[in-house]
Image: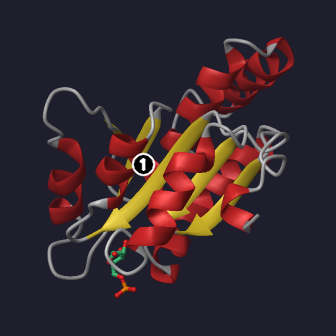
Amino acid sequence: MSDLTAGTAADHRPVAIIMGSQSDWDTMRHAAETLDALGVGHDCRIVSAHRTPERMFTFAKAAKAAGTKVIIAGAGGAAHLPGMVASLTTLPVFGVPVESKALSGVDSLYSIVQMPAGIPVGTLAIGKAGATNAALLAAAVLALTDDALAARLEEWRATRTAAVTERPE
Ligand code: RP5
């Protein structure tokens, strides 16, 4: 059994963070760090729609049985990965458009956001904000059936609210 189809690995790592390239990690690490802060287990992989299509297929088809609950998929440029993965699984897929050099990530955003009706990808903002919010959305989904996580999420939000000063310093 390959690492991609292992049945138990994701039991304590309900979120899979996948990305099209090593170069996406600078963006996608913000999703991982946010999940770390919330105590949500996750597994990070490089899965490219065009360079490793068979890896993508194997990952997406095995994800649900492996215990994955939410997939966060980041990609840049002609960013097929989130939509292709969403076509292969009914797990919720959140897409993060990675900022590209040529078009500043607008190409990534358009590639991910305009899914035809029937195969949804919840599309976030370009870059760090999108990666962070994808993690928060994943945590919110998991918190629906995890009261302890729901409390941590409330605390995370309250901490940020408390950090906002009344006046600029
Ligand atoms: C996409 O192409 C990746 O998601 C990445 O954002 C972009 C560039 O990849 P590299 O050329 O840096 O590997 O597949």
Quadrant of ligand 1: it is bottom left
Residue 50 vs 5, above or below: the answer is below
Q: Position of residue 102 (x, y in %)?
A: 16, 81
Q: Tell me the residue at 33%/47% (across/down).
A: 125
Give the left or right position of residue 16, taking residue 127 as reference: right
Q: Give residue 144's quadrant in the image.
A: top right
Mark 1 surroundings: few (<14), some (14-19) or many (≥20) residues within 10 A: many
Q: Tell me the residue at 84%/46% (across/down).
A: 8
Mark 1: secondary structure: helix
Give the left or right position of residue 138, taking residue 133 as reference: right
Give the left or right position of residue 66, taking residue 121 as reference: right
Q: Tell me the residue at 70%/19% (across/down).
A: 143
Give the left or right position of residue 159, taking residue 24 as reference: right
* Count of marks, rendered view: 1
Q: Position of residue 24 (x, y in %)?
A: 46, 73
Q: Position of residue 152 (x, y in %)?
A: 80, 25
Q: Residue furthest front?
A: 1
Model colouring: secondary structure
Judging by the rendered image, the residue that carries numbered circle 1 is 130
In front here: 142 or 64?
Answer: 64
Q: Does ligand 1 reach within 8 Å of label 1's beta carbon?
A: no
Can the viewer see residue 164? no
Looking at the rendered structure, the kind of residue marked 1 is Gly
Q: Tell me the residue at 80%/16% (across/down).
A: 151
Q: Position of residue 116 (x, y in %)?
A: 13, 35
Can the viewer see residue 7? yes
Quarter in which the N terminus is drawn: bottom right
